[in-house]
Image (cartoon, helix red, strand yellow):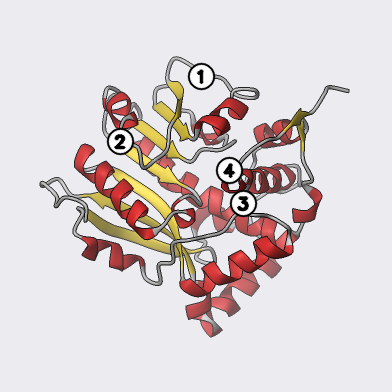
């Protein structure tokens, strides 16, 4: 048996292990919503108490979130197969491995201690590079800017751990540096943030959500150059992805969307595009 790697991460960074585990377990099902064998391989080599998160509902939500973000990245790559994708707060994501088309360019951005752990399981390549930096530090943008455009940014469960001024500053820096880029990230309402933090307490985790956004359209009013293209709740599953859901799950989603539309949209996945014109400086 191979030795497992101990994990020494900060409270927020530690949370990346939860979606890693849930993607791994989901991918081993007979008919998975998301196939991520890379995640399963990594989980086998990490020493951490994963089982406290082994819940089917949580697994479905995590797999759907990853798959929906994958859809937006794949859409970008169909239009720009040699473009550059930047995954912000990549953690132990294997999105590059899932979506690599053989010609894209990719950066995985995360804090130095996360990148150090990531390098134990994943490697840089000719078109794939890890960047140890915080999203709020603009220095990494120069490196990304040397890669071929256009650009697409994806941040899965990242910004909700930051304070709103940090979110605004990070998005403004991206908008100023990468005109016409796409950027996908999730938002949670104040109610969702409170509920998520209570769940952290129940599971004895020190991380806490910070940024509440009741309506992602508010971000347009920040005047930093972002335009909302699409927002989706996890229950808004269409196309090929819908066929991966069981009939009971599809029926449950229809009922939730019909009877509790506000509740289903407390947590949303959002696709923005950066305006091509000069944008206002961050507040």
Q: How far is mark 2 from mark 1, CA to CA?
A: 21 Å
Q: How far is mark 2 from mark 3, CA to CA?
A: 31 Å
Q: Secondary structure at mark 1?
A: loop
Callouts 4 and 2 close, C-beta under 8 Å: no
Front position in the image: 196 or 226: 196
The residue where tag 1 is placed is 124
Q: Residue furthest left?
A: 278
Q: Earlier in the sequence, mark 3 or mark 4?
A: 4
The residue where tag 2 is placed is 138
- Residue 83 in picture, x, y percent from top left: 32, 30
Of tags 2 and 1, the one toward the viewer is 2
Front position in the image: 182 or 49: 49
Q: Earlier in the sequence, mark 4 or mark 2?
A: 4
The residue where tag 4 is placed is 13
* Above/below status of 126 relative to 246: above
Q: Secondary structure at mark 3?
A: helix
Which quarter of the image is occupied by the N terminus? top right
Q: How far is mark 1 from mark 4, CA to CA?
A: 21 Å
Q: At x 74% / y 54%, what residue is drawn?
A: 53
Callouts 2 and 3 close, C-beta under 8 Å: no
The residue where tag 3 is placed is 63
Q: Earlier in the sequence, mark 2 or mark 3?
A: 3
Q: Secondary structure at mark 4?
A: helix
Which quarter of the image is occupied by the C terminus? bottom left
Left or right relative to 122: residue 44: right
Q: At x 20% / y 42%, what residue is drawn?
A: 176
Can residue 233 be seen in this snapshot? yes
Left or right relative to 274: residue 252: right
């Amino acid at each position: 048996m191979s030795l497992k790697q101990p994990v020494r991460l900060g409270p927020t960074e530690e949370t990346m292990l939860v979606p890693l585990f849930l993607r791994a377990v989901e991918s081993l099902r007979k008919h998975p919503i998301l196939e991520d064998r890379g995640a399963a391989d990594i989980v086998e080599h990490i020493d951490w108490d994963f089982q406290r998160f082994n819940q089917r509902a949580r697994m479905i939500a995590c797999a759907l979130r990853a798959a929906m973000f994958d859809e937006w990245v794949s859409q970008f790559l169909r239009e720009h197969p040699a473009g550059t994708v930047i995954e912000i707060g990549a953690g132990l994501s294997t999105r590059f491995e899932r979506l690599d088309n053989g010609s894209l360019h990719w950066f995985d951005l995360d804090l130095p201690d996360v990148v150090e752990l990531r390098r134990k399981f994943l490697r840089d390549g000719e078109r794939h590079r890890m960047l140890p930096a915080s999203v709020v530090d603009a220095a990494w943008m120069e490196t990304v800017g040397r890669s071929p455009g256009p650009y697409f940014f994806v941040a899965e469960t990242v910004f909700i751990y930051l304070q709103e001024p940090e979110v605004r500053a990070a998005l403004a820096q991206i908008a100023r540096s990468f005109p016409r880029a796409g950027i996908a990230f999730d938002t949670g309402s104040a109610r969702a943030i409170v509920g998520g933090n209570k769940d952290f307490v129940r599971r004895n985790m020190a991380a806490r959500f910070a940024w509440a956004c009741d309506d992602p359209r508010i971000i347009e009013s920040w005047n930093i150059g972002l335009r909302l293209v699409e927002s989706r709740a996890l229950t808004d599953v269409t196309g090929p992805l819908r066929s991966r859901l069981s009939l009971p799950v599809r029926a449950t989603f229809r009922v939730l969307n019909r009877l509790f539309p506000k509740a289903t949209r407390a947590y949303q996945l959002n696709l923005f595009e950066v305006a091509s014109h000069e944008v206002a400086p961050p507040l």
